[in-house]
Amino acid sequence: MKKVQFGPSWTPYLLLAPQLIIVALFFLWPAGEALRSSFYLEDPFFGNATFVGFDNYVDSTSAADYGRSAQFTAVFTVSICVISLGIALALAVSADAVLRGKSPYKTALMWVYAIAPPVAGLIGVMMFDQHIGPLSDFARWLGWEMQVGVSYFDTAVAMITVAAWKQIPVNFIFFLSGLQGIPNSLREAAAIDCRSPARRFWTVVFPLLAPTSFFLLVINITYAFFETFGVIDVMLKGEPGNNPVTLVYKVFLDGFRGQDLGGSSAQSVILMIAVFALTIVQFRLIERRVHYS
Amino acid sequence: MTALADPLAPAPAAPAAARPVNRARRRAQILHHIVLIFGVLLMCGPMVVTFMSSTWDPVVIHSEGLQLGYGGKFLETYETVLLKGGGFTGEITGTLMLWNSVLLGLGFAIGKIVISMLAAYAIVYFRFPFASLAFWVIFATLLLPLEVRILPSYEVVQRLGMLNSWSGLILPLIASATATFFFRQFFRSIPDELLEAARIDGAGPFRFFVDILAPLSKTMMAAIFIIMFVVGWNQYLWPALMTTDESMFTIVRGIRQILQVWIGANIPDYNQALALAILAMAPPALVVLVFQRMFIKGLVETEK
C-alpha cells in the first residue's frame, strides 16, 4: 500500500459504492443463490424447496453423462492447450526471428483475436459442413466421411479445431512479447556458446519463456472451460443430442433446458472450486513474475 | 522440418564463396517465412473463404460448396442483411443489430472503466476501515465467471425486473474485477511524491484525481477501453438469455438466431449467414487493427 494516503472520510465509500453495489447485486447474490440451491431440491413450477444435503452433488456427478462430459472437458482442454500453444509458439519463434516481430505477419496472425467465439463457431459449422465445407471435403479425400453434429467423435474433432484455432492469436501475442523481452546480450552470449539454433532454443530461450508458458497454460485452461461456450453452442446448433459438451455447457443445459436447478447449481459450485484452485495457481505465478523479473 | 528447407535452399542462389554460417542462416530465414506463411493461411484463410462465399448465390454454395473466388453479389447480399428485416432474424435488420452491438461494447467498456477506476482509487489512495475487505469482495468476482453462475444471475435479474433492459444486460457483465485489479496495480506504481506534492499545494481527493491521476492514466485507459470494447461486443451467452426482445439483439446474439432458422430450411441462405458473420467480426477486428499497439499493450498488461 501507499505510504501517503488521504485520511479517513466518507469519500472512499462513495467511490467504492458503484462497484460494490454491482458486485453485491449481480455477483454475491447469485453466487449465494447457487450455493444455497445446490443443497435443495426445487420444484421449478411451484417453487417448493426441500433441503436434501449433498444429494444434488452425488446425483449429478454420478450420472453417466456427467462422467462423459468431464472426460470430454479434459480431452478438450488438453487438446486446446497442446494444439494452440504449440502452433502459437512455432509462429512466435518464426516471427521473432524474421523481423523481430515488427512485420505484417504479426498483424495477420493476431487480428483473429477480435472474432467472437460464436462467430468462429459459425465459420466452423460452415467449414465442416457435410455438403459445403472444404474441411469435410478434405477429410473425405483422406477417406474419412465426417459427420459433424451426428457423430460424437467428428463433432469433438471439429469443436477442438475451432476452439484451438480461435485461441492461437492470444498465445501468439504473449509468446512473441515474451520472446522480445529476452535481452539481446543474452542471445548473443548463447550464440557464441552454442552453434545449433535448435539446441540454443531449447536450452536458453525456452526456459526463459517458462513463466509466460505457465501463465498461458492457466489462461488456456480458463478459456477452454468458459470462453468456448459460444463455439460449442453454435456448433451444436442448440441441439446437444448425443454430442460432446463441456462441463460448463452442461451447467447451462441442465439449468435452462433440464430445469434441474439443484443439480445445475451443484455443478456450478464444483466448477467454482476448480476456478478457485486455478486462480490460486495463477496468483502464485504472478507473485513469481513480480519478484524475479 | 529441415527436409522441407533443403530443396528450397539453392533458390536464393547464394554465392559459392559465401560462408556456411551465412547459408545456414539464410536457410533458417526461409524456413521461418514458410512457417509464417502457413500461419497466415491458417488464420486468415477461413476469413477469406467466409467473405468470398458471402458474395455468391446460396444455390451455388449449396451445390458446389464454399467459394474462394469473388461471386459478384456483394451489394445485394449485404444490402439485404443490413437493411431488410425478416429472413434469419425476424423483424430486426443488420444495421440495428450493429447499433445494439456498438451500445453494448461502449456501455460495457465505459462502465467498466469508470466503476473500476473509482474503486481502485479508493482502495489505493485512502486509509479507511474495511479497505482490504472491500478489495477482497471485489476481487472474489474473479473466482466465478458469469458462465458458471448463469442461472442464478438470470433469476436475480428477472426478480429485479431488468430482463430486456440495457442496465440488466450491461451491469451483470461489468461485475468483475479484472479492470479494478489492473488499475490498482497501475495506481500503486505511481510515485508517492505526486500525492505529497499535490497535498502541499492544497489539492483534495477530487482535484488530485481529475488533475493528476486521470491524465496519467490516459494511455492505460485507452488500452483497457480497446480490450473491453472487443470483449463487450463479443458477449454471447448473457445477451442470448437476457434479450428475448428482438429490437435489443446484438449482432453476435443474432448468430444464434441464424441457426434456429437454418435447421428447417431446404437451401439455407448461406450467403446471408456468412455476411452476418463478416459484419459481426469487422468492427472489433478494425478496432484491433487500427489500435494494434495499444491493444497489445492492454492485453499484455491486463492479463498478467
Image: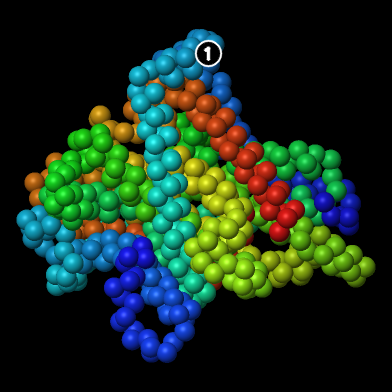
User: Which residue shows up at 23% across the image and 63% down it?
Assistant: B49
The foreground one among B92 and A171 is A171
Left or right of A53? Residue B58 is left
- Element under label 1? loop
Question: Which image quadrant for residue B68?
Answer: bottom left
Q: Relative to B26, say whether A145 is above or below.
A: above
Q: Position of residue B115 (x, y in %)?
A: 64, 52
- Which amino acid type is shown beneath numbered disc 1? Phe
Left or right of B190? Residue A145 is left
User: Which residue shows up at 53% across the image and 26% down it?
Assistant: A269
Residue where numbered disc 1 is placed = A54
Q: Position of residue B89 (x, y in %)?
A: 24, 50
Q: How many marks?
A: 1
Q: Where is residue B50 in the image (x, y as percent from the top left)?
A: 24, 61
Question: Which image quadrant for residue A74?
Answer: top left
Left or right of B83? Residue A28 is right
Question: Which image quadrant for residue A251?
Answer: top left
Which chain is disc 1 placed on?
A
User: Which residue shows up at 51% across the image and 20% down it?
Assistant: A38
The quadrant of the rendering that contains the C terminus of chain A is: bottom right
User: Which residue shows up at 27% across the image and 54% down it?
Assistant: A123
Q: Which colour scheme is used?
A: rainbow
User: Which residue sits furthest right?
Assistant: B200
Q: Can residue A236 be seen in this view?
A: no
Q: Can residue A276 be seen in this view?
A: yes
The foreground one among B157 and A76 is A76
